[in-house]
Image: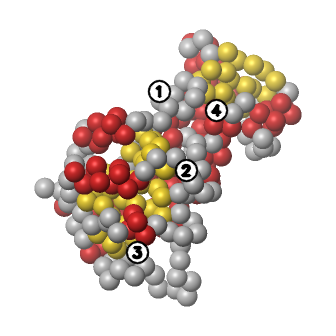
Amino acid sequence: MGKENIICGKRVIREVINSEVSIDVLYISKKINKDSITDIILWAKKNSVDIKFVYENDIHNICESRVNQGIAAKISNYKYYKFGELLNELEKEEFPCVLILDGIQDPRNLGAILRSAECIGIKNIILPQKKSVSITDTVWKTSMGSLAHLNICRINNLQNVILKLKQKSFKIVATDVNSKMNIGDEKYNFPLAIIVGNEHEGICDKLLSQCDIKVKIPMYGNIKSFNVSVAAGIVMYEIKNKQRRYRV
């Protein structure tokens, strides 16, 4: 089984059954308290989803982890959006905003970023095809199922995407530790694309040179760096909050 097609845990599965993602098979441990998943079982029966009651070790093997709450599901292949489809979704938004992730390597970081994005109200995400983690079971788990409510697009050339977004009047925003502008200094009252760099090298120079606005997150401690998922959460929250406040 492809790891992209397996999700584990009650909360993640509940998020998926309330979305457009299709579940093909539901795997349930014979040891699980069925009263704790009555709603999931009823949903599966109503939607003619194949239910397999299996041994506990089988669940561990399916999830490749012992942390799974005794339930897993095989979903249909994850549907990545095409860029044109993503633009159509952005046109529907009152406050258009897209998140571009420049080569996140750790699936836990990606999952945490996607969870924050969904909570903050950023639904449209762009990932590069290469040098980036794809959607895996770990991403599903770390995102707490928020993937089910996001539109994710994988692109070969992020530079071309940025040019196309600029043609649609999007301003490109990125964090840069060398910037003199703090993240709270701008109003962000325009369509936005937020770029977040990877864990080790940040945003590549070619993408950074395309940015319209470069801001920094003020830091006051001795350690002058955030984990990428924490930094992304701060950036998304601050920018999206300002965008809603000052949109004209």
Q: Residue at x 28, y 36 (%)?
A: 88
Q: Amino acid at mark 4?
A: Asn
Q: Residues within 10 Å of mark 2 (few under 14, many from 20)?
A: few
The label nearer to you, 1 versus 4, is 4
Query: Tags 1 and 4 in contact by the CB under 8 Å rule?
Result: no
Please tell me how crowded label 1 is: few (under 14), some (14-19), or many (20+) other residues with Cα within 10 Å. Answer: few
Which amino acid, by three-letter code, is at mark 3? Asp
First-in-chain label (1 vs 2): 1
Front-lying residue, 13 or 193: 193
Q: Is residue 212 left or right of residue 42?
A: left
Question: For the residues marked 2 and 3, what is the alpha-carbon distance in whole angstroms?
Answer: 23 Å
Counting residues from the start of the chain, the first of labels 1 and 4 encountered is 4
Q: Secondary structure at mark 2?
A: loop
* Lower sequence index among marks 2 and 3: 2
* Residue 118 seen from this side: no
Quick one: quadrant of the N terminus? top right
- SS for tag 4? helix
Q: Quadrant of residue 56?
A: top right
Location of mark 4 (residue) = 5
Question: Where is 170 relative to 89, above or below?
Answer: below
* Disc 2 target residue: 130
Residue 216 lies, in percent from the top left, at 38, 76
- Structural distance between the alpha carbons of marks 3 and 1: 37 Å
Any part of residue 172 in sight: yes
The residue carrying mark 1 is 20
Q: Disc 1 versus disc 4: distance between alpha carbons?
A: 15 Å
Which residue position holds label 3? Answer: 176
